[in-house]
Image (cartoon, grey):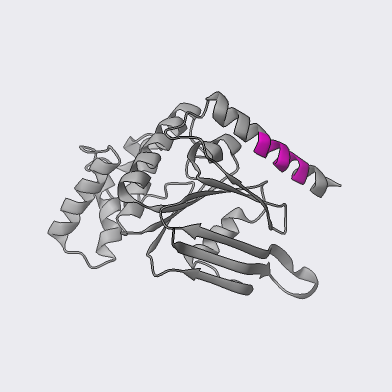
Amino acid sequence: MSTVVRIDDVTKQYGSGGNALLALDRVSLTVGTGEFVCLLGASGCGKSTLLSLVAGLDRITGGTLDIDGDRVALMFQEAALFPWLSVAGNVELALRLQGVGRAERRERAQQLLEVVRLGGFGGKRPHELSGGMRQRVALARALAQDADVLLMDEPFGALDAMTRDILHGELERIWQERRLTVLFVTHNVREAVRLGDRVVLLSSRPGRVIEEFEIGNPRPRRIDSPEVASRAAEITDRLRAEVARHAH
């Protein structure tokens, strides 16, 4: 497996002097082509900061960060759709920014809505959709960027359990069909075990990689299966110990 994302001794500090905040401290991590890696840790551990650095939205303070020539797309917890645009218009926006012509934009947007199982909803406005459907639109918009690497920052965190479970299956299907590389931030241990090939545990601030867990359970997985629950319990114990250490 070739390496797509290479993070080597990356540090991120905000501010300077007495007001400096060290968010990430010498983080090293690689993500292979087609791999699904979940970043897990307590709130404030730097998961989202690391994702922003990989996305190029912020600059590292130290170390090196390389993306192996692949286009990167970022999907947030909030769908962040433009309310004045239709569903198809929101997806087309990503294509318009790439200079794609109008006819091709419409065709590709329709294809992507079919991929996320929203065919027939292109003319709707975001306020007419459920939260889960809006996240599907956001996923279609991310896919419209022709990204090989998909960065996801707690994209299902605000959804109810059933909707989240359905979208886990949809994401897994799209990841496999399109052979994407996914770096997925979550604070939900079972979600990480349900989706990930590998779960990377970050320490409390400053964020450091303290352990990696290979998830060998065969796919497809159920979030409520005994196998997922058992592995999640193991990781939760490690996470609980880290949180307790930081509290003292």
Q: Where residue 132 appears, x then y in whole percent?
A: 40, 36
Residue at 46% across / 35% down in the picture?
Answer: 218
Give the percent coordinates (x, y) of residue 238.
Answer: 72, 41
Residue plotted at (74% across, 69% down): 20
Magenta residues, dominant SS class = helix
| Front-lying residue, 225 or 133 | 225
Instruction: Give yes or no for residue 188 being in the magenta stretch.
Output: no
Name the residue: 38% across, 65% down: 70
Question: Would residue 90 appear left or right of 40 to someone viewing this image?
Answer: left
- Residue 212, image x, y percentages: 62, 49
Magenta segment, which residues?
234-242
Q: Nearer the viewer, residue 201 or 138?
A: 201
Using residue 162 as the reference point, say whether residue 119 is left or right of it. Answer: left
In magenta segment, residue 239: yes
Count of marks, rendered view: 0
Work out which quarter of the rendered image holds the N terminus and state it.
bottom left
Asked whether residue 59 appears in the rendered view, the answer is no
